[in-house]
Image (cartoon, rainbow, N blue to C red):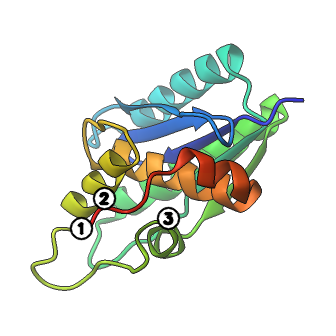
């Protein structure tokens, strides 16, 4: 039975992680296109996911649910929600279960708290936790995908997640 999971941190540069609970994820990041050309970003996501779904048909796809804090321009909002819609649509086409996960819930589960506040290096904290898990993410997009994947694995199979997880660094 296929138990593989893919997690996406959807953005112009999308982080991804995939694998079965209890295993080590394969992860990476992909630049989908130029934000000035939203259609190209959509085409980039389509091409990436279509190739991944054909090569590695995950049983489930999860993504970081959109959260737009602060002032965003209309193009950013369109792209952010458009990527989510496209991922859901492609999962529907390929017959793959798809759902979102809240970023704060993931971070609280993976870090024990939600880092926020002025001067807090959230990206550094996320990168450090991914490294604690034994990964070497290229950037925070990939690190977010790794933590999201790890969190979902822990939800679906807590014993497997414990076997695959070193303790938090001090």
x%, y% of residue 128?
26, 54
User: Farthest right residue?
Assistant: 1
User: Farthest bottom residue?
Assistant: 117
Mark whose residue sits in front, 1 or 3: 1
The answer to whether mark 2 and mark 1 are in CB contact below 8 A is yes
Residue corresponding to mark 1 = 122
Residue corresponding to mark 2 = 126
Most foreground residue, 36 or 85 = 85
Please determine whether, in this image, residue 159 is positioned above or below residue 134. Answer: below
Q: CA distance from mark 3 to mark 2?
A: 18 Å
Q: Residues within 10 Å of mark 3 (few under 14, many from 20)?
A: some
Q: Which image quarter is the C terminus in? A: bottom left
Residue 152 is tagged as none
Most foreground residue, 1 or 117 = 1
Q: Residue at x 45, y 71 (%)?
A: 67
x%, y% of residue 58?
73, 31
Q: How many marks can you see?
A: 3
Residue 134 left/right relative to 21: left
The answer to whether mark 1 and mark 3 are in CB contact below 8 A is no
Query: What element does badge 1 sit on?
Result: helix
Q: Which image quarter is the N terminus in? A: top right
Q: CA distance from mark 2 to mark 1?
A: 6 Å
Q: Residue at x 63, y 52 (%)?
A: 161
Query: What element does badge 3 sit on?
Result: loop
Residue 113 left/right relative to 63: left
| Image-quadrant location for residue 38 | top left
Q: Which comes before the other along the chain, label 3 or label 2?
A: 3
Residue corresponding to mark 3 = 66
Q: Residues within 10 Å of mark 1 (few under 14, many from 20)?
A: some
């Amino acid at each position: 039975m296929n138990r593989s999971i893919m997690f996406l941190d959807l953005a112009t540069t999308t982080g991804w992680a995939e694998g079965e609970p209890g295993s080590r994820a394969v992860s990476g990041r992909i630049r989908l296109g130029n934000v000035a050309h939203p259609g190209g970003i959509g085409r980039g996501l389509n091409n990436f996911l279509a190739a991944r779904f054909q090569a590695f048909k995950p049983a489930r796809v999860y993504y970081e649910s959109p959260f737009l804090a602060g002032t965003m321009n209309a193009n950013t909002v369109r792209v952010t929600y458009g990527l989510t819609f496209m991922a859901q649509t492609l999962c529907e086409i390929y017959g793959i279960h798809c759902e979102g996960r809240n970023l704060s819930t993931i971070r609280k589960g993976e870090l024990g708290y939600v880092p926020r506040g002025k001067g807090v290096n959230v990206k550094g904290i996320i990168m450090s936790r991914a490294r604690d898990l034994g990964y070497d993410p290229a950037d925070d997009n990939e690190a977010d995908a790794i933590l999201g994947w790890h969190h979902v694995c822990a939800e679906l199979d807590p014993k497997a997640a414990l076997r695959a997880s070193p303790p938090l660094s001090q």
